[in-house]
Image: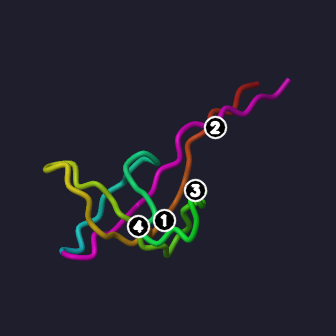
């Protein structure tokens, strides 16, 4: 029997103001321009609001890469 166990999705973002890059989890980014109240899936190329962990403030950032970790059990 095979089993896949997906864990948290991660995002590589580049902050618009200083071009620093950081890997963040789903709870650390959010859409800026959401067209409705339903949460849309974040895609590569989206401009999001991302937390800067040293000061806890939210800044504009571009999503460069998206991925997830998973466990494959036999």
| Along the line of sight, the residue nearer the viewer: 61 or 21 | 61
Reading the image, the residue beneath label 4 is: 48
Q: Are marks 2 and 4 in contact (CB under 8 Å)?
A: no
Q: Are marks 3 and 2 in contact (CB under 8 Å)?
A: no
Point out which mark residue 65 bears. 1
Q: Quarter-wise, where is residue 1 in the image?
A: top right
Is 71 situated above or below 46?
Answer: above
Reading the image, the residue beneath label 2 is: 6
The CA span between labels 3 and 1 is: 19 Å
27 horizontally vs 40: left or right: left
Magenta residue span: 1-17
Q: Quarter-wise, where is residue 13 in the image?
A: bottom left
Q: Are marks 4 and 3 in contact (CB under 8 Å)?
A: no
The CA span between labels 2 and 4 is: 23 Å
20 horizontally vs 37: left or right: left
Mark 1 neighbour density, 10 Å: few (under 14) some (14–19) many (20 or more): some
Point out which mark residue 39 bears. 3
- Residue reaching furthest right? 1
């Amino acid at each position: 029997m095979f089993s896949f166990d997906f864990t948290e999705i991660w995002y590589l973002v580049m902050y618009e103001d200083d071009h620093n890059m950081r890997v963040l989890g789903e709870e650390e980014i959010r859409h800026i321009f959401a067209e409705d109240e339903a949460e849309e899936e974040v895609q590569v190329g989206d401009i999001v609001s991302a937390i800067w962990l040293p000061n806890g403030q939210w800044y504009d950032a571009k999503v460069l890469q998206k991925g997830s970790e998973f466990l494959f059990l036999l």
